[in-house]
Image (cartoon, rainbow, N blue to C red):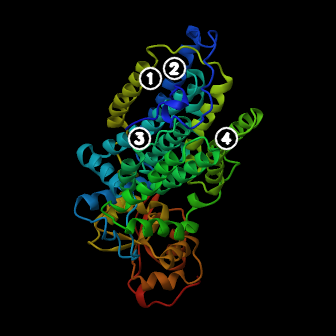
Amino acid sequence: MPFPVDHTMPATAARAPETPVPASPAPESPAAAAPAPFGLVALPLILVLGAFAVIVQKMAKPIDNADTYFHLRLGREFLEGWSPRDPGSVTRFATADWLPTQWLGQMGLAKFEEWFGLPGAVWLSGAMVLTFALVLFLVARRRSSLVVASFIVPVAVVAASPNLSGRPQVASYLIIALVTAAWMAAGRNGRVPWWIIPVTWLWAMVHGMWSIGVLISLIAVLGIALERRTPRGAVLRMLVVPVGSVVAASLTPMGLGIFTSSARVGAISKYFAEWGPTQFTLPHAAVAALMLVAVLGLALRSGPVPWLEFMLLLLAGAWLVYSVRTVPVAVTMLVPLLAARLGRVVPRRAGWRLELPVILGGFVLALVSLALIVAQTSADPINPDNRAEASVHTLADGTGVLNEWKDGGHLLWRHPHLDPVMHGYGDMFTATEIQRNYDFVRLEPGWIDTLRELEVTEALVDADGKIAYALREALGWEVVVEEAPLVHLRAPADWATGADAED
């Protein structure tokens, strides 16, 4: 993928000759360009390589995120014939007319599972997180010293850490960092980042956050226009990028349906905690907020803030406070902004010629190490030998199973012949069905009648949870098999016509 280079040539090289432009920045002083002492090279490199090692350690474990499992299941369905324009449903209890927002990413994840089993899926997830960290380093290094870039990477990874898992969204985060850096470079050299258009075409099939890239492009073009340093013709050419990106997204197999699918996500976001407002008492959110404060403080102390930087900073701040899900979006946008500001106050010394080979070598070593480790640590699913899991697996095809919402993705993958009542892929459910699932989780009045209407007579739930207690103690459901942490329960013979118990 092309990467925006931080050119130091005079700005006139990229503008019409008749247009007056600001003078190029003064060259660094000999002292600032002097070779760095060994310690100022070795320690930052160790910090970046250490971040790679921590990511390997955190990712090399069995998949315990239910969302990863339903991505694997959906990816398998697309591999086996689902169309992005007309997908099916993985359970009869989800009947919304939906369109996928990340089908290509899901197919990639499922393909690695097909080739290498669960370790393959874990490796691909870890490789994406490692690539995310590498991209952040490269973006920061373009605008700052090795010391600054090596400091920013672990800070940003910590700030985004809750969202760095086996989900296609990680691809969105790293592309957002590249797009933000590209527009910052365009503001300096006047060059149009045309590569964003074809990347958006691919991005729109991998994950639904492609529209954030379009918004960043629009905001950046507005900021560049307000600065009045770039010729009008160049600004108009830049405007083609967000417009062309929207056109490119509409040319994916989903067609124009890609726009309605994004609106669908917004309509049901209130039902999901990750779309709730950011909680700044959480450590990762506090770190992200500190990044924003640092950029703002450094910008204000240096005088008037350029429009482009101000607009990007304002957008990053909006994503930071908008929701838990968009905190990493803010973090990735802040990385080039923070690097640029710190790069002005921390002296830049001559780079070590082996710096990039060492970083890339460490990245490759991390990928290899991850592959070797996951083969030993990540082959088993959740509760691999649980007898309650094995018991429900023997049920007939199409059997409805009441389950814990948090376990729905795992059930979809592990028992593909069953129909769990709940799972976390909200796009597939109507608003009424999502509310129904909430009522089950909270045992709201009327949940028993609803369960009877669904004609569900089997359950796989937490053995010590309130759903298991209500089914067993209040409604007389029988224990088929119980082995912590799960219990397989079955309704009594007269369940369908029995009198209601207390809700």
The residue beneath circle 3 is 128
- 319 and 436: which is toward the camera: 319
Residue hosting label 4: 306
- Alpha-carbon span between mark 3 and mark 1: 16 Å
Residue positioned 63% across, 43% down in the render: 284
Point out the tag, 4 or 2, that comes first from the N-terminus.
2
User: Do tag 2 and tag 3 residues touch (Cβ < 8 Å)?
Assistant: no
**At label 3, which amino acid type do we have?**
Met
Mark pair 2, 3: CA separation: 21 Å
Single out the mark in the foreground, 4 or 1.
4
Residue 321 in percent (x, y) is at: 66, 54
Residue under pointer 1: 359
Depth order, front residue of 97/459:
97
Task: Single out the mark in the foreground, 4 or 2.
Answer: 4
**Element on which disc 4 rests:** loop
Q: Residue at x 34, y 54 (%)?
A: 106
Cα gap from disc 2 to disc 1, whole angstroms: 7 Å
Real-space Cα distance between discs 4 and 1?
A: 32 Å
The CA distance from mark 4 to mark 2 is 32 Å
Query: Can you say whether 258 is above or below 351 in the image?
Result: below
Does the residue at mark 2 contact the one at mark 1 (Cβ under 8 Å)? yes
Picture layout, residue 443 above or below residue 344: below
The kind of residue on which mark 2 rests is Leu
Specify the amino acid type for callout 1. Ile
